[in-house]
Image (spheres, grey):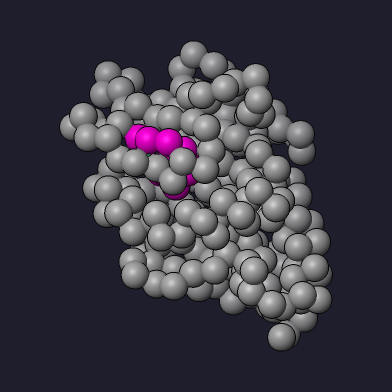
Amino acid sequence: MDEKTIKIAYLYEDLMNTYGDCGDVKILKYLLKLRGYQTQVDNVSLGDEFNAFDYDFVFFGGGQDFEQTVVAKDLPRHKETLEKYINSNKPMLCICGGYQLMGTYYKTNEGITIKGLDILPLHTVFKADKRMIGDTRFMTEWGEVKAFENHSGQTYFDNPDKLHPLGEMIEGYGNNPQDHVEGLRYRNFIGSYSHGPLLKNTNVANAIIELILAWHEERIKTPVAK
Ligand code: GLN
């Protein structure tokens, strides 16, 4: 195995890439290059085999309701590997539609309930009368983040006392209009409504790179599939 190659799994890259979320992966690629690493990005799409432990980082971007419906049918095959990966503190970033699909369900505009992976205790309900669109600013453990949101899904934590949001809103909506929080930080999983892309905020990108490199060091020492 090449010690200087970082492997990134991009879940459904061809379907889940609203508002240029692939920019998050491009920024990671660039910042890793500055640190002397090359990057291999695999599009894990419909029907593909996938073991999360073969990767140093998993990315899942945003998508519109139709694409989410298509992806949600294929996604349950990967529940076991993703659940183990997340619960053993490996790094993953999910944006908007991808973030929604990691929860229990997403009830769409048409009243269709898309089943999520049910890895994280949160759910999302589409509210047609309140599209959350515009610039956002929020405070995270790594400092302030500036981004852009565009969603009608309102996300709620099932047990707000146990889940930590990614940030506290300064401007914009984030998860929903009531809670004034953005995204989720659970172990080394980050969920967020931030497009723009999120990782143009290099404070967050560099924090994620530290997580990636720590796991990469461990992974290359034990290359057996788990
Ligand atoms: N379709 C979802 C919503 O509107 C997600 C949109 C997105 O990923 N940008 O909430």
Nearer to the camera, 21 or 47: 47
Instruction: Indicate whether 134 appears above or below 220.
Output: above
Image point (63%, 51%), residue name: 86
Image point (76%, 34%), residue name: 141
Can residue 100 be found in the magenta stretch? yes
Q: Magenta residues?
A: 97-106
**Quarter of image, res 17:** bottom left
Residue 24 visible somewhere in the drawing = no
Residue 153, percent across and down? 37, 30
Image point (77%, 75%), residue name: 222
Nearer to the camera, 144 or 99: 99
Residue 46 visible somewhere in the drawing = yes
Nearer to the camera, 99 or 80: 80
Nearer to the camera, 73 or 70: 73
Q: Quadrant of the C terminus?
A: bottom right
- Toward the left, the furthest residue is 110
Instruction: Indicate whether 109 appears above or below 40.
Output: above
Residue 21, percent across and down? 47, 53
Residue 96, percent across and down? 45, 41
Q: Is residue 170 left or right of residue 10?
A: right
Residue 111, percent across and down? 21, 29
Image point (71%, 51%), residue name: 89
- Toward the top, the furthest residue is 178
Q: Quadrant of the N terminus?
A: bottom right
